[in-house]
Image (cartoon, helix red, strand yellow):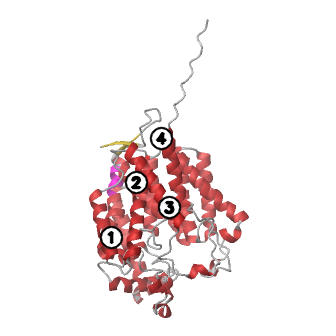
Amino acid sequence: MRAPPEVAPKRAADPLGMLGHGLFLAVFAFYWITLTPFVDLTGAAVVDPVAGNSNALNQLVALALFGGLLLFFLIQRRGVRVFGPAWLLTLLLSWALVTSATALHPDLAIKRLILIGMIICNAGIVLVLPRTEADFARLSALVIGAVLAMSYFGIVFRPTLAIHQASEILEPMNAGLWRGIFAHKNSAAAAMVLAVFFGLFIARVRSRLVGWTMVILAAFFLSRTGGKSAALILPAILVLGWVIERFAWTRLPLILGGLIAFNVVAVGASVSEPLREFISSLGIDATFTNRSDIWRFAFEAISDRPILGHGFQSFWQTDALVYSGSTLETWAAVAYNGHNGYIDTMIDMGVPGLILTVIWLVILPIRDLGRAQKFDNSPAMTRLFTRVWLYTLVLTCLESTFYQGGGALWFCLLFSIFGLRLQGSARLVPTRAASPAQTMVVGYA
């Protein structure tokens, strides 16, 4: 008799692994899709101050996700250090607490600070929920695919909520520009750039067909948003990422030096007439789409409280500002933010807060990138984290990204810098085959 063929044993079901994957999808969906996609911008309420507004359901879901992630991490992932450096985060959050406690609206500032702390924890823990690099790609593809599908669905079937309309109160000039599930064309443009980065990663790790389809769909959507800044920065980041990946000595001058130079030139043009004339002579809009008015107004706010700042999100869109006499002097008093994350960080936490933020979000990731390349971990994951990190840093020169309470950009920036840190200090699991307790990162060098 011939022996029966060997049958490969089926991998045992792993409820905890499935729970981890479910948490990953829920967290990514919460920050990318949110609980309120397809926002109606034609109502009169969009002109009201929003700094103190809160959504009870949103808070409950945020607390539930934070609690679930923390509990899961403490039980299953103990010993894997996803946050860091601890001394810097402790110093930064302690300073933020001091500035918030002394703010004009301490209750609002401290509430926002607590939310920021929760997002930081979420972004760190979510990295170790997938089992392997392939799982990370597969789960990411599900969320990014859902974002693209919902956005295109809105364009076709709910155009009044997915495309800017002339009937909108605040910015009717955006009529015809696509925004998909997002509240503004700029948010949609930024999300589509991130989707391109994820698509390139998925094409490399998981499926070329799926990945490149996402890249094409995201790039086309980006072209219809009218997001000029995002569209111009995208190819620049791909080139910059290629350069710093191959020439390590260029990292500090190109990244830190470039950010300083751009901010000095762009923001400086708002207060310096010679600089403004020089930029205009180059054929560049020296107002950077009317941002110069906001930046001049922001500098006045910084000069009022240069050390302690005004507290987390306790300046823009507050009743005291929107209904003050400043609105008669400049329209910038009703702006939603400073359209520059570095300026807004100074408004929120003063100059010391900006210094600590630059060390955490700019300088240390440069070091971690070098370690990641030497540690022989997945180049594809390191490249994804690097592209998201670089893009957010550059875009923050024109948009407020740092310390935002929700949204894909701030969340993705956080998990990218934590990801670079892990890539340079932890070992990726090469296959699924090992024990169910293994995670995407195990052990430290």
Point out the stretch of residues depicted in magenta.
Answer: 366-372
Specify the amino acid type for callout 2: Gly
Residue 16: assigned label: 4
Residue at x 39% of width, y 65% of height? 114
The answer for how far apart the CA atoms under marks 2 and 1 are is: 20 Å
Q: Secondary structure at mark 2?
A: helix
Q: Percent from the top left, x then y, of residue 253?
A: 34, 65
Say which of 4 and 122 sits in front: 122
Can residue 312 be seen in this snapshot?
Answer: no
Q: Secondary structure at mark 3?
A: helix
- Quarter holding the C terminus? top left
Q: Which residue is mark 2?
A: 124
Query: Quick check: is 369 in the magenta stretch?
Result: yes
Say which of 356 and 71 sits in front: 71
Q: Earlier in the sequence, mark 2 or mark 3?
A: 3
Can residue 410 be seen in this snapshot?
Answer: yes
The answer for how far apart the CA atoms under marks 4 and 3 are is: 23 Å
Q: Which residue is mark 1?
A: 96
Query: Quick check: is 70 in the magenta stretch?
Result: no
Closer mark to the observer between disc 4 and disc 1: 4
Q: Earlier in the sequence, mark 4 or mark 1?
A: 4
Q: Which residue is mark 3?
A: 60
The answer for how far apart the CA atoms under marks 4 and 1 are is: 36 Å
Specify the amino acid type for callout 3: Leu
Q: Residues within 10 Å of mark 3 (few under 14, many from 20)?
A: few
Q: Secondary structure at mark 4?
A: helix
